[in-house]
Amino acid sequence: MLEEWLLAGGSGSARRILVVDDDPDLRRMLQHVLTLRGQPPMLAGSTREAQVLLREATFDLVFLDVILPDGSGADVFRAIRATDPNALVVLMTGFPDHPAVGASPDAPTGRMPDPGGGSDDVRREAWGHPKVVVHFLDGHLLKGFALDFRPSRGAFLLRRRDAVDVEAAIRIRLAALKALFFVKDFEGDPTYRELSDAARSSLLGRQVRVRFRDGEVLRGTSPSRDPGGAGFFLVPMDPRSNNRRIYVTATNAVECRFEGGDQP
């Protein structure tokens, strides 16, 4: 839906986009990729800044962080709906356990209801904990649920898949990783051979090739303007891949470059 919206924005009147997030790295990334698509956004780093902008203008699309340093994203959401009930709002958060996550505009402190049924894996992911497989530089792996992943922090909390205490979590340093794989299923399909040369177009990314010290090569699309920075997200080329996206610790890779020799 979002990709179709951005494509449609190439014709007709100009669209107004607002990005509300307290993470400056994420704001800059979204500003960069949206500007490349001819849709430069306005930026706000707090509830107060967003409220000021919403009093001055209406927006067709809003990227909204649920948890902000001076209030709840639900307050901003209500302000958006009050001025334009048809605006497209994309909710984002790096704190899936926070009480405001899953809240309705009328109950900003509500909890996401327990989905019930299914396995523990299904219930935990439904609560907003993405399934991840951590690939360390020394070759060992950990499977679990990422609780608060945000690249700019340099570390995140992982609740191991087999943890008996659901509140237990371990701190993972990104500098110790080869990559972090956000997966659809912990086991995947061992008989399926992923197609690294599959065609995949994306409005929010360019094709990137990554080579690691152990010889593994990944190809995908990334919104990053600099695949040679500290790290970046990559979406696999094969839509049938078990990996939804991959965070590559670029400083621990041998090579990270745009495909076809393109440079940022």
Image: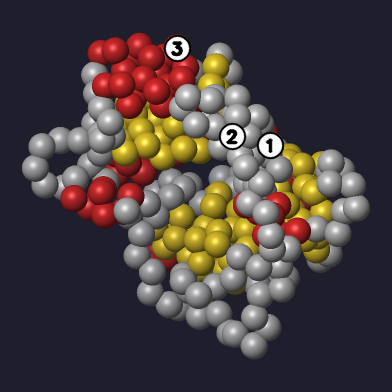
Residue 196 image point, x, y percent: 50, 76
Q: Secondary structure at mark 2?
A: loop
Give the mark, 1 or 3, whose residue is nearer the N terminus.
3
In this rendering, would 164 be left or right of 181?
Answer: right
What is the CA distance from the residue labelled 3 to the residue labelled 2?
A: 19 Å
Q: Looking at the image, which residue is at 50% across and 75% down?
A: 240
Is residue 97 in view? yes
Residue 71 - label: none
Q: Secondary structure at mark 1?
A: loop
Q: In the rendered image, which residue does mark 3 sit on?
A: 48
Q: Which residue is mark 2?
A: 101
Q: Residues within 10 Å of mark 3 (few under 14, many from 20)?
A: some
- What secondary structure is found at the residue carrying circle 3? helix
Query: Residue 139's spot in the image, x, y percent?
Result: 81, 66
**Are the residues flagged by discs 2 and 1 in contact, CB closer than 8 Å?**
yes
Query: Can residue 178 be seen from the camera position used here?
Result: no
Residue at x 25% of width, y 27% of height: 84
The answer to whether the residue labelled 3 contacts the one labelled 2, judged by CB atoms less than 8 Å apart, is no
Q: CA distance from mark 2 to mark 1?
A: 7 Å
The answer to whether 256 appears left or right of 55 in the picture is right
Label 2 Cα crowd, 10 Å radius (few <14 / some 14-19 / many 20+): many
Mark 1 or mark 3, whichever is nearer to me: 1
Outermost residue on the left side: it is: 12
Please give the label number shown on residue 97. Answer: 1
